[in-house]
Amino acid sequence: MNSGVELVPVEPNISPAYFERECDTIFRHVWLQVGRVEQIPRPGDYFLRELAAPRAAVLVVRGSDGVLRAFHNVCRHRGNCVVSRGEGSARSFMCGFHGWTYDTEGALIHVPQEKEFGGLNREAFGLLPVALEVWEGFVFIHLDPSPPETLQEYLGDVAPLVNGFPFDEMELAGHWTASIESNWKTFQDAFVEAYHVMTVHRRSIPDYREGPVKSDLQTFGRHGNLTFYLDLHHEPKPAEAWAFQAGSLAFLRGETSEPVRDRRPAGLNRGKKDNWIFDEFLIFPNFHLFVGDGWLLCHEFAPISAHQTDWSVRYYLQRTDNPVVRIAQEYSKVTMRDTIREDLSTIESTHAAHRSGALSHMVLSRELEALIAHHHAVVASYVEGRA
């Protein structure tokens, strides 16, 4: 067999039984990214995450004391959900079945006809906690209220690479979602290699057709990092040229203003090349972070079944009061949206081909698609009890 080729089996991408093992061995036992702190800025603000893979509904709330906490969305009485709306603000949470009520710190504060429960100790029956920690504004939860490792320990050597990035200066520019008929791993595979760019993005980014975008790979246990570079000789259209000049599309051609470049974290662009465009971080199991100069792209691939994945992508740009830059950023947002739409064009057909039984293995390049093979290997190590 060619030493430059990695054969990765297709069966784990289509097997419902394998998917159930992934749910049990991975998603119920690792840190999962569920949102951003700015989603709940004030006491009483909350959001609810229905997580199909770990089979859990998690309520994330900022308490009256300002502290972020997470709880199972389960009433301690008989298990009905406490919150039905996906997000909002509340002083308390009342179960719609029998009226048991909890405060924003999770304490049980009211039980109708409490005397009929014969001295019920309300302090013992607050909402069931879920571990919550925050990294650079990203909210992570772990279903074990006392997880075996902290979030920082889980992230390991990934976290220091983006130390100093101005996450707190970013504002949401675009948010797109889709429900795709695909296995979650197949879906993610499309976003962890640049080999597809010259074909899939031949219309939106035509200058890459001479060859694939270059990338460097490093892995950190279960996580991975790709650093992308490009050599682009481009004659932009008038509107595009204006957006380039304003800076919002500079990352597409490796051009960045000196002030922005000077603030770049040392862990990015480890090759220190002038044609760097961004770094991508695959934070196991299903969170991808793309970090460039003045912008941030966050992908979450939420498994629903062996054959369905809910996908969410958030695009952040550096906050500015400059109206010219704001207009240019709108152009950037549309460009990013259209590029991502192209990425979605092959996902469902690939999964359908896997289900057909025609392929037993994918044939991956160890040079161009190494992070795909790495991710599948890490998944297998959890499922097989080797992690």
Image (cartoon, helix red, strand yellow):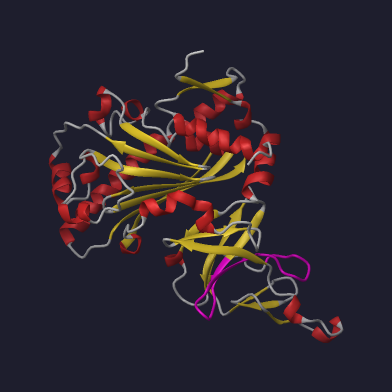
Would you identify the image quadrant in which residue 325 lies? bottom left
| Quarter of the view holding residue 230 | top left
Left or right of 219, for residue 243: left
Q: Was residue 71 drawn as part of the magenta stretch in this picture?
A: yes
Q: Measuring from the top left, give residue 181's x and y in whole percent.
A: 55, 36
Residue 86: tell me if it is visible: no
> Which quadrant: the C terminus?
top right
Does 86 sit above or below residue 116? above
Main secondary structure of the magenta stretch = loop
Instruction: Please report the bounds of the magenta region as a residue range.
Output: 60-81
In this view of the protein, which residue sits in the foreground, 182 or 145?
145
**Which sits in the foreground, 151 or 97?**
151
Give the percent coordinates (x, y) of residue 382: 64, 40
Residue 56, visible in the rendered structure: yes
Q: Residue at x 42, y 66 (%)?
A: 38
Relative image position of residue 101 (x, y in whole percent): 68, 78
Residue 174's place in the image compared with 199, above or below, is below
Which residue does the image show at 45% across and 30% down from the upper left?
370
Pick whichever, 250 or 349, lies toward us: 250
